[in-house]
Image (cartoon, rainbow, N blue to C red):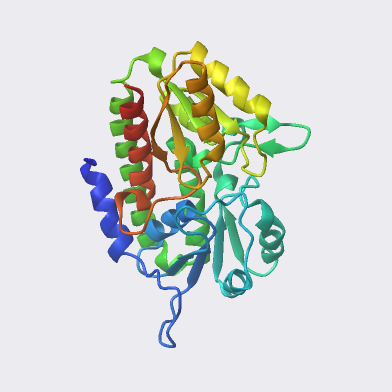
Amino acid sequence: MKYPYLIIASLFVFSFGCNTNTTDSPENEKPVVVATTSIVADIAKNICSDFADVKSLMGPGVDPHLYKASHGDIELLTNADVVIYNGLHLEGKMSEILEKLKSSKTVIAVSDGVNDASIRTINEEADVHDPHIWFDVAIWSNGVRHVSESLKKKYPSHKDQIEKNTKTYLHAIDSVNKECIKLVESLAIEKRILITSHDAFEYFGRSYDFKVRGLQGISTLSESGLKDVTDMVNFIIDNKIKAVFVENSVPQKALRSVIDGCKAKGHDVTVGGELFSDALGADRTPEGTYLGMIYFNVETVINGLK
C-alpha cells in the first residue's frame, strides 16, 4: 500500500519529535501532557514536538466508548500538567473525572474548538452529539487550532515552536485530505455506500460524499438487535452492496451476522477490509498516525467497493 509523501514525513515527527515514554526518569523535567485517545494524542505529539512528554491512556484498538480508567490512569491524569480529550461524551465513563480535573489543571477538549453548527446532533433534548469529529478533517483542523492556542497560553516560552509545528501539521492534514478526495473521485457516486459496525463514519460520509449506515448507534454501548440486523440485510440487498467494513475497535460478531443473513437470502457480501474508527493503528506504522489512518481508511473503502 502506497502512502503520500507527507504521511511518511509525519511519521518522523511522531517517531523523533516527541518523548512518549510511559515512565519518567528523575532527570526528566519536561511537562507531561496526557491525552485520552491515540487520535487526540497525535495532535499533542505533533504540536508539542520535543518540549513535552506526551502520553496516551488508550492504545491501538481500544474502544473509548467502553473504556474505564484504571487506578494507574487516574494517577497519570492527576499528575499531568495538561490533559487533552476529545469531548462530546466520547470518553463516556471518564467524563466525571475529566470535569473534576478542570479545577486543578489545564484540561483541553478538542471539541471546544469546533463550531457548534458543524457538529451532528443525535438527540437534541438529551444533548447527545456525534463525537467522531476527526473524520471530517476541516472540523478536526479547527480542533487542532484550539489545542494549539491553549498550549501557547500554557507554555508561552514555547509559543513560536508550537505555532510552527501547528502550521506544519495543518498543512500535512490538508495535503492528505486532497489526496483522499482524488481517491474518492475514482469511485462512481452510486457505489459510495459505506456499511460499518457502528455509526462512527457520518462525518466521513459528509466529507467524502458517501451514504453511511452503521449497525450499532454512535456509541458501542448500544447493542444491535435482530431487527437491526434484518433491516441492514434488507438495505444491503436492496442497494446491491458488495462489501461491508469491520472496525479495529469493535467486535465483528454482529456484522458477521449481517453477512450470513445476506448469504441466506442469496446475496453474497464480503468484508471489504478493516477500518480504523475510534483508535489509531499500531505504533510505528502509517496507520498509527492520524494522517495515515485517514488515508488508509479512504483507500480501503475505495478498493473494497470498486
x and y percentages locating residue 143 in the rendered image: 50, 46
Which of the image's four quarters has the C terminus? top left
Residue 177 vertical placement versus 11 (above, below): above
- Asked where in the image residue 83 lies, by quadrant, the reply is bottom right
Q: Say left or right for 287 vs 214.
A: left
Residue lying at the far right of the rendered structure = 125
Q: Name the residue nearer the viewer: 111 or 241.
A: 241
> Percent position (x, y) of residue 266?
47, 15
Q: Does 215 sit above or below residue 33?
A: above
Residue 141 location, quadrant: top left
Left or right, 166 with respect to 100, comes to: left
Comparing 191 with 102, the one in front is: 191
Q: x and y percent of residue 86 in the render? A: 56, 50
Q: Which residue is painted at 35% across and 68% down in the image?
A: 50
**Extreme front residue here?**
264
Q: Which part of the image, by quadrant, shows the N terminus?
A: top left
Residue at image x 70%, y 66%?
Answer: 103
Which residue is at a point 69% across and 62% down the rendered structure image? Answer: 97
Q: Nearer the viewer, residue 175 or 281?
A: 281
Residue extending farthest to the bottom is 26
Residue 100 position in % (x across, y down) = 71, 64
Q: How many marks?
A: 0
Residue 25 found in image quarter: bottom left
From what the image shows, is residue 59 above or below residue 116? below
Q: Nearer the viewer, residue 228 or 294?
A: 228
Q: Residue at image x 25%, y 45%?
A: 6
